[in-house]
Image (cartoon, coloured by chain):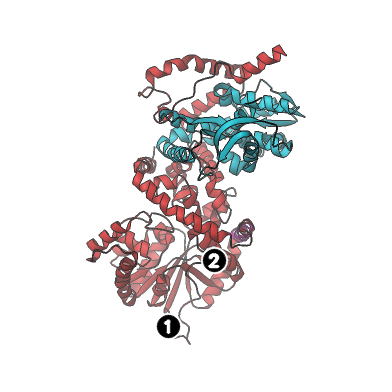
Chain colours: A red, B cyan
Amino acid sequence: MTTAARQFKGEATRYTGDLTHRHWIQKALSGYEVKRDENKGRFQDWESARQAAAQIKYEVINHLDQYLAQFVKNIEARGAVVFWASDAQEARDYIVEVARKNQVRSIVKSKSMTTEEIHLNPALQSAGFEVVETDLGEFIVQLRDEAPYHLVFPAMHLTRDQISEIFQQKLGAAPVKDPEQLTMIARGVMRQKFCQADMGISGVNFGVADTGMISITENEGNARLSTSLPRVHVAVMGLEKIMRSMDDLALFLPMLATAGAGQLISGYNTLYAGPRAADECDGPQQFHIVLLDNGRTRLLADAEQRDALHCIRCGACLNVCPIFRNVGGHSYGTTYQGPIGSVITPHLRGLLEWKHLSFASSLCGACTQACPVKIDLHHHLLQNRRNATQAHPSWLERLMFGAFSIVMRRAALYRLAMFMGKLFQPLHPLVKGTAVDPVKAWTRTRETPPFAKTSFRSWWRDQQKGA
Amino acid sequence: MKATLFIPCFIDQFYPQVGVGVVKILRKLGHAVDFPDQQTCCGQPAFNSGLWDQARSVAEHALDVFRQAEVIVTPSGSCGAMMKIHYPELFQNTPRYQEACELSSKIYEFSQFLVNRLGVTDFGATFKGKVTFHDGCHGLRGLGVKNEPRVLLQHVRGLELLELKPAETCCGFGGTFAVKYPQISSAMGDSKCSAVLETGADYVVSNDSSCLMHIQGMLTLQKKPIRSLHLAEVLAHSL
């Protein structure tokens, strides 16, 4: 078992056993489900919208070279500087360099999972820059020195009491519990930071190719401040985030809001089209876009799973996933949690190290059903399992399933195996629940069914004879 | 019509009454029933474990066994989905791809066969008791079985159908997942059992015995009085 697999198993077991955690998460997400279904109903037809969205993404991902070139050409024409980063290291180095060149001291950030993916904060901090997260959830988990729990709701695992506690500890705040008052405490801190910051870092929800713009979706307004007040704006964008045109956004903006947060539309949807122009009085003087590959072209080359690049990071698959709802977001140990994380992490960070996530699924398909861009998520988990088993077969499983296939190809051997099972089952109580119980993983929480006195095939044979 | 039965291995050995129920119902409706006795397993355990070569060799056996069948009826959404959805994929770029597609087109989950193919929703079945229905995920999301079992249950005399809340959440069985990650699987099972108990039903019914093996296994260990039954057992109760 790899380190990541051991860590996952340990954490998953710990969280699953924590009933308070389980109830909290399930309660938090049940509210989402109600709102999501309400707003799905406002689409003329949600299933057709999914189909249309999937087709748009299919077109873009399968012509990514053209759309990326168009996007870059158009946004460069308006003064943006585009940097193509092939991996996380290149992206980090570039951003640190931009900060150095501009004599930046303090940096504000809006919510971005892509910057989590490249571990940007530690790199900037160790280079001597102050970095403050300005999304409320991200701000809270940054104070707690934790990774985001959920790719859309980073602090959903925390209660008001826990948030109040960390505000008291880290900010010397008064012991208030009211959500509005807690928000005001965070705002008080952040407003200062926005005014002081020399550099703002954001993610990108969509890059619009035909106009050369980036679109950022948020509910708090902090991204607008992070990207417009500081002198320098750096946007980090996964290269799959391209849309063809503004028309596409007409579908994708409400879809992202509904699938992701159960909203009709997010609070703020803003398009950014480059640095401050000559005739403008505000906005950043420099506008950098870091286009990140970091394994995405590997996924692009995989015809079977290429549609995983359709992902708009809405988090719908996490919200409905019974595994996520039990193990929580921190067990995964990945940037992207839940089904989409289990599908893409092996491609981004190594199949053998991360294959265990593809096995940690009952393959119920709720994720695939929820995905607004129709990524065949649970199917890709099966493909990851196959690829991992081919790349690194476990001799024990090979032996077991080798025997399984020999037996199941011959009815006589099947009958013999079942006869043996029936013969030995009465002895099972002797070892049941002990270390030598061959099915102890089952019997600890579940009773085993007894073999029937007469199997179906025996019954069939007997009544055929009688007939 | 002659219906050829595929009785999955665990139904054959643990729950033969499910297969017997299917036979009784189809015969009552005037159809001939066939059971090729060389059949074994659909190969899903190997497939889901990533060992597609081993799964394919088991699936080839199924292609041989069911070659002559006109329609294949199975009382398991999960095994049905394996044959209907995954066989064509498993045989892609192999000489038997066409055969796999043909087999796939003949597969019917039991309740879909009754309602959609035969157009039967009521054949005078009687069953006394309060029943809640659990949707097996592979039947529900793989094969699109949702209303068929409910329509059938609603026409059973004496039966009161109580909806599970939430109805579409996985019970946590998931085949080898149940023993690879027993804690997660059992936690999911716990939620499902609580939902079942909350309905106040006397029986939890499903079209997948594998889910029921898991749910019943937990209920028995927790000494809960509620019993699990396959849809075919309920429908065949009075026959």
**Outermost right residue:** B1
The spot of residue A237 in percent (x, y) is 47, 64
**Outermost bottom residue:** A279
Per the picture, the main secondary structure of the magenta-coloured stretch is: helix
The spot of residue B150 in percent (x, y) is 62, 40
Disc 1 versus disc 2: distance between alpha carbons?
26 Å
| Horizontal relation, residue A375 to residue B112: left or right | left
Q: Amino acid at mark 1?
A: Asp
Is residue B237 in the magenta section? no
Query: Looking at this view, is A383 or B126 the one in front?
Result: B126
Q: Which residue is mark 1?
A: A282
Report in which chain the residue with disc 1 lies: A
Q: In the rendered image, which quarter contains the C terminus of chain B?
A: top right
Whether labels 1 and 2 belong to a single chain: the reply is yes
| Horizontal relation, residue A151 to residue B91: left or right | left
Where does the magenta region start and end? A51-62
| Horizontal relation, residue A425 to residue B123: left or right | left
Query: Looking at this view, is A360 or B229 the one in front?
Result: B229
Labels 1 and 2: the sequence-earlier one: 2
Q: Which residue is mark 2?
A: A253
